[in-house]
Structures are given as structure tokens and as C-alpha cells.
Image: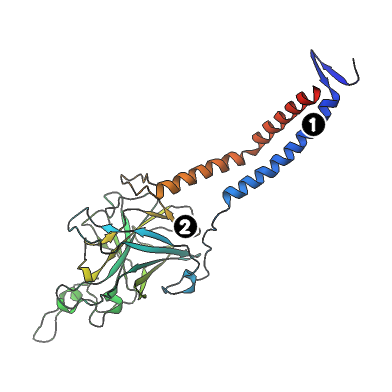
Amino acid sequence: MSSQSIEIGSVSIDRNAARRATKLAVIVLCLMMVLQVAVVAVLTVGPQPLRSVNEVPAEPDAAAWDDAPTETVSLDPQQMALPYGGGSVDEVTVQAVTNDTHVAFRMEWEDPTADTEINEPNAYSDAAAIMLRSGSQPPVTMGASGDPVNIWYWRSSWQHSESDPGGDMYSYPHPDNETKPGQAAGNPLSKSSYNRYAQNYYATGYGSLTNAETQPVAANGERTDDGWAVVFQREHDASGQYDAAFEDGEQMYLTYAIWDGDADEVNGEKSLSYQFLTLDTDDGTLSAADSDDGGGNETDGTDGGAVAGVTDSALWLVGAATNWPALLALATVAAWLVSYWRLRE
């Protein structure tokens, strides 16, 4: 038997070729490990998630919003239930920030007129709302039976009216003094003054809007150069039956609506988004929900579907790249066999 070869059964292994093939296999192994680290880094590094802020802002012009990512949401007329209408606002830009205790959403849209008074017939207020549900995506029709939603609502007349924000037109004269039945009955839309400028509602479909017993939501709206900017703010924890739950790892779905008072928009006549966004409750980032919402509704797949497809592909590649033990073993064995075969020739 030659000192340059090893006999294993009927197989003869060339020692020199095997030694050199092993060296090359080790080099390939090292290169594969470096490549694996590089691939994972490339596929997982992207725009950094929104860093939690120290203090969640209540003001629309707070500096904390400057670095918060912005999503632009398309709006359309409400065409699902009477009264149909709206659609005067084409889009709204939204942002979200969070910290350990609070979460806030900012909405901004164009509206050339500030409609803040409802003290006469056919006078309507500008308004905005966010519809939220955690866990699973609800029907866009203000929820449904078994799929309750939480709605946060702001009205400009509550904050900026120079007259009674409850509406002077709902009063009538009385021998002793002026009578306002809405305020006397405790109607939350007829208060003589507001200090949080928001109402917290629940709904299980059109026609089911209910004022929540607890009112943990605050809102603040201010005029911009060409419209409105409104901030909704709430603590993560809320005790209401259907309040949105901002819990770690719990998916949150959101959609938006705008009312333009100058366009006579009120109640069901509004501009709304038929596409949901999702909120990452850990870091506050917003992104388009998957087109398959699981709730019988289809969102606009033009942008959301493409984003989802790219994301799925990236995640698959990351998974493949991170399954490195098997990959490295196969690559090392293949490198040794090929090198040995070529060196032995």
C-alpha cells in the first residue's frame, strides 16, 4: 500500500489530495460563514423602526412628530350605508408614537375652510375619527356583531367654537331662561364645554354607535397652513369593554375618516379609508395591512399587496439564510468532494 494513499475497503483515498481538499473546504467554510452574516445583515437592515419617545405629545406641532414615519392614506366617499356621500377629502397623512404608558396618533389633511360653528341650521363642523380594533381585522363597516370596534372622534366645534360648542340652534326660549334639552339629557354631543375635545365610542356595525361609559381619549386639533392637524392620545391601558388594547405583540388595526363641514358632511357622509393600517404596539410603526384581511373585506392590493409580497420574499430569504448549520455542512462537504476530485486527477 502506498504511503500516499489510504485504503478503506475498496476505496483508495489519496492523502495529499485529501489534505489539500480539507484546507480548501475550511476556506470555503469560513467564506460561507462570512457570507451568511452579510446576507442576514442586508436582508434585515432597513428603515429603523420608530424609536419610542420619552413623552408622547399632545400637540400637533410637537417636535416628537418630526422624526415619526408618515403614512399617506387614500380616502373615498362612504358608499356602504345610508346616508351615502362625502369624499371631499382625498387623503390624510397619519403618524404614531408611543412610550411605556401612552400612545398617540396624528392626522393631517387639507381643508381650506375652518368650520367650527354649528349655531345655525345647515352648519356643520369639521371632524376626524380613528377606528381601532386589536387582535383581528374587523369589517370596515364600523365593525359587526361579534366584531366590536373602538372609535375615537374629534370635532372642531368642541375645541374652537366661539359660541356654545353644543350648538345654540338646539336651544329654545323658556319663560325663566333658555332651555337646552340635549344638555339637560346629558347628550355627550351637546355639552356646553369640553376639556379633552374627543369622544370614545363603540360600534358593532352601522347604526350601533354607542358612547362609551369611560372617556380616556384626549384630542387636540390645530389649523395648519392648508388644513387641520389633529392628535389623539390615550394611555395604553383602558378599562372600557371594547377599548382598543395596546398590548405587546397584539396586532392593532386602524382606519380613518374625515368630515368637511363646508361640504355639508355629517354622520355617514364622510371621507373614509377602506384600507386598514396595522400598528406595531412595541415601537409604534404603522404599515399597510395585508390584502387578505380575514374579515371578508379586500383592501387595495396595489400598494399593500406589493409591499406584502416583497416582505414575504425577504422573510423567506432571511429564513433560508439563517438555517445556516445545514447550509454550511452541505457547502463544506460539497467543497471537499469537488476539490478532492479535481486535485486527484
Count residues near mark 1 (Cα–Cα under 10 Å), then give few for <14, some for 14-19, many for 20+.
some
Res 73 → quadrant? bottom left
> Amino acid type of disc 1?
Thr
Way the structure is coloured: rainbow
Disc ID at residue 54? none
Image disc number at residue 281: 2
- Position of the N terminus by quadrant: top right
In this picture, residue 17 sits left or right of residue 212: right
Q: Kindly give the residue lying farthest to the front in the view shown.
A: 345
SS under mark 2: loop
Amino acid type for the residue under numbered disc 2: Thr
Query: Within 10 angstroms of label 2, few (less than 14), some, or many (20 or more) residues?
Result: many
Farthest bottom residue? 176
* Residue 187 in sight here: no
**Is residue 165 among what the camera can see?**
yes
> Residue 341: percent from the left, percent from the top?
76, 23
Kindly identify which numbered label has been placed on residue 22: 1
